[in-house]
Amino acid sequence: MSGRARLAICAWAATLLASCAMLPLVSPATWIIQAAFMLAIQTGVGAATRRVPLARPLTVAAQALVTLLMLTLVFAHTQALAGFVPGPEAFQHFADLLQQGSDDVSRYAIPAPLHDGIRLMLIGGVLVIGLAVDTLAVTFRSAAPAGLPLLALYSVAAGLSESSVSWLWFLLAAAGYLMLLLAEGRDRLAQWGRVFGGAPRTTPGSDSSGPLAPVRTGRRIGAVAMAIALLPLPTISGGLLDAAGTGVGAGNGNGGTISAVNPLVSLRDSLNVDENRQVLSVRTNTNDISDMYLRIVSLDDFDGTTWKPSQRHIQGVPNQFPTPTGLGADIKRSEIKTRISAADWYAQDWLPMPYPPSGVSIDGSWRYEPVGMTVVGDHGQNTRGVTYQVTSLDVQPTAEQLATAPEPSAALRSQYTKVPKSLPAVVADTARKVTEGSTSHYEQAVKLQDYFAVNGGFQYDTQVDVGTGRDAIAKFLKDKQGFCVHFSFAMAAMARTLGIPARVAVGFAPGTPEANGSVSVGLKDAHAWPELYFEGVGWTRFEPTPNRGSVPSYTQSTTPGSDVPDPALPSTSTSTAPSAAPSASESCTAQLRKLDGCTSQAPAFATGGDPRGPWSYVQLVALGLGALLLLTIPFSPMLWRTRMRSVRLGAHGRTDADAAVHTMAVWEELTDTAWDFGISPDESLTPRRAAARIVELGHLDPPSAASVHRVADAVEQVLYAPRPQLAAGLAKDVRQVIAGFQDTSGRSTRLRALVAPRSTVRVVWALSAWRTSVTTRAAALRPTLRKPSGQRG
């Protein structure tokens, strides 16, 4: 196998290994098989065109053309001409699929369903990266820069994936790149100065010694470098829960941390879905489900632009959870038991539970974070299809207890009232204005809740963008339109400016009672709400979002006659009626991934199979052969002439016989080139007379004419001299003649000489001679096959 062929295979393998990083993003992962087939065809076309050889730009163009034909056959065959030739309708279909894929990327949690739009983005992206890698590493023989597209492919996948085995994808991508470098540098490694690993060795049974030790040493160096590169991997995991120490994602599970990665809790598109798909099925022993909020995680780190969970120490799940921070003995409470079953498509790292929990019974690998009183999965554990039981407290403080709550500790107040200097002044100004005249933090909190939910003129609108940047809250206060994320973020930030410890909780609002006694929690119940801290009571829920969830009973006593919704009434979010507001987007933003609150894939994909079935691979093979045939038929004369010119003008042996054969091949190439430009050969002329004729009819310039005569003189030496003096540089002379013909010929003549050269008729002559030879040999064999006649001699 040639070095370039080996390099092409390594480029294919490196691209495929880097593509494995995208396997966790979608389900099923059958797209990787299609990508491997199509990538192999693309690589094969590149190898074939380089073998001809074609100019480098033409090689890349041929690969790009075949790639487009393959994508057309697989994704737009009904809109294409003959099933694989793209036209305007096919390109429009591509645009529609890409738009659909873009929407699906935002809409679905990871792993997303393998719809056609996402499949086109995955396979098309792999083929584009594969073409870039093949072009850089093989066509232009520069493997080092080929690492950039490979890095881009891996980085995009790693940035979206939250797989607990992300180190494996890095290992595969790095191994592919290292393999590519080793393939390119195999000869260069042999030229490194002193041999590191010992004396040069020879291959067994071979007389030629080769510098194999440097090659082996280079491989060892690469392996050591990869091992060193893998050492920091546990700290660069890109998921919501990052591994640290021996906690989540690695170790023995006795400790660790939860990273402060933004959980991206925008719920807009989940609230806009047409189908309120069930996420959780809940059974509880309480008669009042209006306060049955299922809390997933609390966000307590506010940087002025968003809320996210702080880095927290985690530990093994205790049998009995400790009493919640700040909850005094004089606060009325009751114990509730709840059984929760998660849907088999709902993969959440955090465990949805009523707050505050006092115990949980669940199978699997889970860890407990004591500050937020949350339970998180370890080593890839999630909620998909699990059933668990939670014991929790129904805390029932009175308004008086909240109003007379003492100041919290300095440490707690310092941590949970922190606001960045970049927070616009309008946030604090509005908070002071709304709560003017209040005599306690409790009264301030109720006035903030009423400002958003009742008398502030705010409208609940799930079509409003979440907004980013430090002015997002200020914009919300001005526009007065938004949904739960806006209301909860704004109220928590404003509470902090007033000195009230605050954080944001993410989870689900109370669901819909079912006839069988269970409660169905659906996508539209995804919710966010603020939690404010009161000493003696602890973290306390408030509900500033109008028409969502239920307003706590302990917030109504100070606002008699208000328009706050009655908590006994069912939440509008629990309605089974379809949403009245049309969805502006079918996408689910990345901010809902941790809630996994997105619609399911289409029924055609529910079984996890490829809707095209096994025929798609047959089509791919047929497409590859058809594409090669499509390229071969119209361009076969050009390809044949290019190949013949490369062979005739290529290197030759050092003996006199080899040089003589090379001289005659060069002369044949010169006469064929003249023929391509309209000067037919005349076999009756001597080389000297034929050269003069070519110079005269071709109107060649003096340098080109001199080159023609030098080649003719060399041919005469081979044919007539007893001891021919073989000339050097004949191939260069022929190339000079080719340039001369191109300078003196018109555009149409040059185009015909390139695309439809006349000298390709030699192929027909050769086939005719071969047929005649076969026929003659067959005829010569016939008498020996005849039966003996009955005549006697």
Image (cartoon, rainbow, N blue to C red):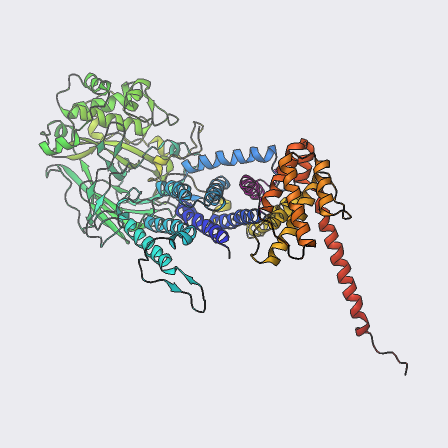
Residue at 35%, 55% (x, y): give it.
218
Q: Where is residue 384 in the image (x, y as percent from the top left)?
A: 35, 48
Q: Where is residue 526 in the image (x, y as percent from the top left)?
A: 33, 36
**Nearer-the-camera pick, 222 or 689:** 689
Q: Can residue 28 be seen in this view?
A: no
Residue 66: say if magenta.
Answer: yes
Answer above or below: position of 786 versus 481.
below
Answer above or below: position of 179 versus 150.
below
Which residue reaches farthest bottom?
A: 792
**Nearer-the-camera pick, 721 or 502:** 721
Which residue reaches farthest front?
A: 722
Q: In this view, does 355 lie to the left or right of 605?
A: left
Residue at 76%, 48% (x, y): give it.
683
Answer above or below: position of 253 versus 707.
below
Q: Where is residue 509 in the image (x, y as percent from the top left)?
A: 31, 35
Q: Is residue 86 left or right of residue 7?
A: right
Q: Where is residue 731 in the image (x, y as percent from the top left)?
A: 59, 46
Q: Is residue 639 visible?
A: yes
**Nearer-the-camera pick, 788 or 532:** 788
Residue at 67%, 46% (x, y): give it.
712
Answer above or below: position of 195 versus 616.
below
**Nearer-the-camera pick, 358 or 736:** 736
Count of marks placed on residues: 0
Magenta range is: 53-81
The dominant secondary structure in magenta is: helix
Q: Quadrant of residue 113?
A: top left
Q: In this view, does 448 lie to the left or right of 170?
A: left
